[in-house]
Amino acid sequence: MAESRSVLITGAGAGIGRAAALGLARAGWRCVLVDADAAALERTEALWPAGAQKPLGLVADLTDAARIERLREEVPPLDALVNNAGMSAGGAEATSGHDDGGAARLLALNLAAPARVVQACAPHLRPGARIVNVASGAGLRAIPWRGLYSPSKAGLIGQGRALAHARPDWTVTTLAPGFVRTELVQRLIDGGRLDPTQAASKIPMGRMAEPEEMADALCFLASPGARVLTGRLLVLDGGSSVCGGSQPLPPCERPPLAFDAPLRPSCEAVREPLWRAALDKWVRSHSSHAGHAGSSDYAGVADARALDAPPGSRLDAVLDAARCFRARHAALASLTLLMPAPEPGLDWQMAGDADAARMLVATLAAEWGSHALRINALELPRDLAPDACLPLLDYMAGPRAQFLTGQVLRLGAAAARDHNKETPA
């Protein structure tokens, strides 16, 4: 039951961590809040939702290995652990040989602390626990003159992949946020140190994210529905990591809908029987709102025509799906493509087709973002049960993921293995 679920969140005193803690509390989780700043924890607790279980607040400097070890004696049984604490400042002089100790502190918090927290809490993690590391888009592309910040986040991404391989019984995922309008970013804007228009001009969605959007992603990744993503990276950056070019992108024409707006799902070109049954169930799960479509609804389309595309024709199928979607939706909607995972041994002459299709997804994300239109894709192993994908599809297609675009997620084999264990031969 929801009342029995417990989650530990580091860096819970502000920004994404605070928003995630409040979101999880509203969803019925018992939260263990960890932060080095006691006053910040008090501010988070002061915002606690009425009726939610009282949190356990722990003041801890996570650059101190001994303090992390003491968490072993302080935390209750946990269903999920969110390694969110991190820092971006410090260590800028590390590569010049004139570092004042900031680099060591940055690496201790951004890279060493997540592993130490997992080790300290491991005895308290329940079977099937979810581990979520919060990295950054800086781990995907270098940010110059920031010392070891990008290397620390790239290392955290790699650490998550390795942990998923070492502990297949856990679900291990990594979130890579883009530009988020946290309190810190807002202070930079207010002080004239950051131009929000210039920042948004590099983002296909034409705006910065709100902390609540990252919180919704963390709430999903902390849930059992994230099993299909174990070992994977969820990049929530408005498409900036998949977009190139030297021209600034236009601002978004529409503000995002409320993140709790009703999802109005629909399906296109679903021929495979198991997928048709699963997606029909998905649509019916939102049927209480059917027949009352309005301007507050968020349209989410799942298109499966690429599942049936013969080898070498996936690009054509994606293009056809995009044209159909664009003809019907002018703004504020999402398209999620269902595609088969790449086939081993495919003739080399056709091998570029899947990569071309992925790049088309990225290109369309950049072109559609200013209209608040999104496009993503799921690459599906053949033995993966469709029902296992429905929680992820519901999140990706809906209003909670309005900053998620241009991503092609290759789902992990762990969920398929889990399903095969549960299904008699």
Image (cartoon, rainbow, N blue to C red):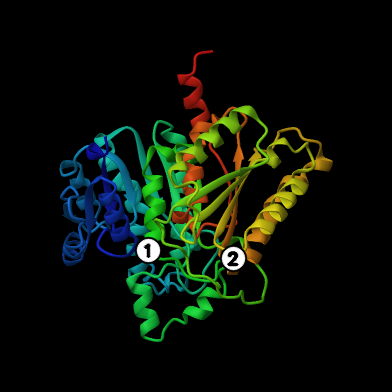
Q: Residues within 10 Å of mark 1 (few under 14, many from 20)?
A: many
Gap between marks 1 and 2 measured at Cα: 19 Å
Left or right side of 298 for 270: right
Q: What element carries label 1?
A: helix
Q: Is mark 2 on a helix, strand or loop?
A: helix
- The location of residue 104, given as percent across then percent down, is 35, 63
Find residue 369 and name its label. 2
- The location of residue 87, given as percent across then percent down, is 35, 65
Q: Is residue 324 visible?
A: yes
Instruction: Tell me, yes or no, whether the two marked residues, 1 and 2, touch with CB atoms within 8 Å.
Output: no
> Is 273 in front, or is 245?
273
The residue tagged 1 is: 211
> Is 360 in front, or is 301?
301
Question: Quarter of the image holding residue 340?
Answer: top right
Which residue is depicted at the point 55% across and 69% down? 203
Quadrant holding the N terminus = top left
Left or right side of 62 for 180: right
- The location of residue 351, given as percent across then percent down, is 77, 42
- The location of residue 155, given as percent across then percent down, is 46, 53
Left or right side of 254 for 58: left
Amino acid under disc 2 = Gly
> Is 397 in front, or is 296?
296
Question: Going from the N terminus, do you reach mark 1 or mark 2 first?
Answer: 1
Which residue is depicted at the point 57% across and 45% down? 266
Amino acid under disc 1 = Pro
Which residue is depicted at the point 28% across and 54% down? 21
